[in-house]
Image (tube, rainbow, N blue to C red):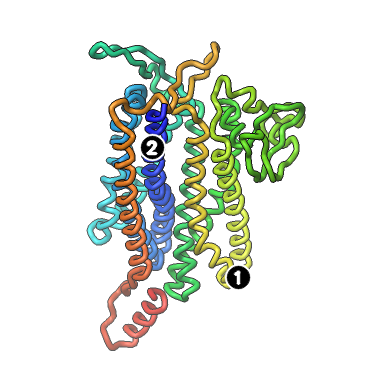
Amino acid sequence: MGEPMDLVLLSRLQFALTVMFHYLFPPVTIGLGAVLVFLEYRWLRTGDRIYHQAVRFWTKMFGINFALGVASGIVMEFQFGTNWAVYSRYVGDVFGSALAAEGIFAFFLESGFLAVLLYGWDKVSRGFHFFSTCMVALGSIFSSVWIVVANSWQQTPAGSHLVERTVNGRTFVRAEIVDFWSLVFNPSTVHRLNHVLLAAFVLGAFFAMSISAWYLLKGRHVAFARRSFTGSLLLATVASFAQLLSGHFNADMVARRQPAKLAAFEGHFQTGEGGTALYAFGWPDEDSRTVKGGLAAPKMLSFLVYQDLEQPVPGLDQLAADYGAPPVWLSFQAYHIMVALGMLFIASTSLACWYWWRGTLFEQRWLLWFFVFAVALAFVANETGWIAAEVGRQPWIVYPMQTDAGLVGGLKTSDAVSEAVSSGQVLGSLLMFGVLYAFLFALWIFLLDRTIRHGPDSLEPAVGPEAGTPLSAIAQRATHLYGE
């Protein structure tokens, strides 16, 4: 048993490393795509060249994150075939259609217009460049749609059935599509997609606010930074509030479709009598099957799930036999960190909007410093959300399908690893990827730092006045004030 267990653990660690590193970049590009559309629209609408300066700067940031996202994402697809061959056979028919749709409808759209976005400023009209910006932003969203569809099918399978296939005398089970649209709109797709996209908008907005706040604190590129900050603040505020509503509906779906995951999120070991408490924080102890040092609102979990204070929510003692028992401590902490950060984002953006309404936002240096560093919290919120969703469905890599006859099918993570790969090989590649991704992370930080230090390009006068004239002096002074 030692070798298979080690192989499963190492394979999971390797995939977690590659996915979590890759997931630093797609949410930023999705969020920045929305920021770019807003800023370029404002430039076209108002003719204010500060918006032109802003959209060109954030386009550079978008390009850096897009490039790192592509470079880090390729590895994951190879891991399906190397480390998870049994899993690949099981989901190949389902994933083939979803990933093909991503390539056709998303990646070609995004990459096709990306060159125009990055290099077409002086080569195409303003209107066509804005159209290209919209297409790149739409392409990044479409890409997330098909990835979420595939992942959501693993969580709540639909539109498929299980069949036995025999190849070269070996029999295996695989899921095959019977209804493509039922697969696409499986019970968790819409809820999870809304949650993922809103989290990306929050991260992209906080990314732009972080850099803009730093410029404001340093007194550099003030006009550019103010416009970038306020536009991103609006997006962050709306997305943060919408995320609260999305999170409720997503949790309600989990309660119905993956009750063991919800029990792990809440450290709910024993079903008990009467209403079930909702924990704000705590330390789940799987040995004593209690949450130690926690703060709980009595009966609130029952109210949120059933709108009934007295109906008990099933605990892991009732659910483990059918659904298995997820790792409780990690699921609980990741979920509660994500929720706590979401509430912090609502509070901080609301406070910033209040100061903005009063006209004193940029006088609150302490709040600007908070936003400089809050982008790290937005990254943490995205990563912990992914951890909670994936760890919470264990021991399943593909969840059983809910039918009138009960739970059907499913593939456990321990049964999904490749049969021809050894623990030593996985460990060696894990270490290699660790070194490679450390280099890519350092490169990312270097490129961001260099771009931030350079700042936005200086504005050129709309009409070039002759040198030495009063009009030339005014233009140079304006360029200094607004460009620097």
With respect to residue 304, does 475 lie above or below?
below
Counting from the top left corner in percent of width and height, residue 346 is at 60, 52
With respect to residue 263, does 42 lie above or below?
below
Name the kind of residue labelled 2 in the image: Leu
Name the kind of residue labelled 1 in the image: Thr
The structure residue drawn at horizontal position 55% and vertical position 38%, both measured from the top left corner, is 331
- Asked if one can make out residue 142 in the rendered structure from this viewpoint, the answer is no
Task: Determine which of the numbered discs, if any, sits on residue 360 in the image.
Answer: 1
With respect to residue 433, does 312 lie above or below?
above
Q: Quadrant of the N terminus?
A: top left
Q: Nearer the viewer, residue 180 or 12?
A: 12
Neighbourhood count class around disc 1 (C-alpha, 10 Å): few under 14, some 14–19, many 20 upward: few
Q: Nearer the viewer, residue 450 or 425?
A: 425
112 sits to left or right of 265: left
With respect to residue 240, does 15 lie above or below?
above
* Camera-side mark, 2 or 1: 2
SS class, disc 2: helix
> Distance from label 2 to label 1 (Cα)?
52 Å
Q: Quadrant of the C terminus?
A: bottom left
- Tag 1 or tag 2, which sits nearer the N-term? 2
Residue matched to label 2: 10
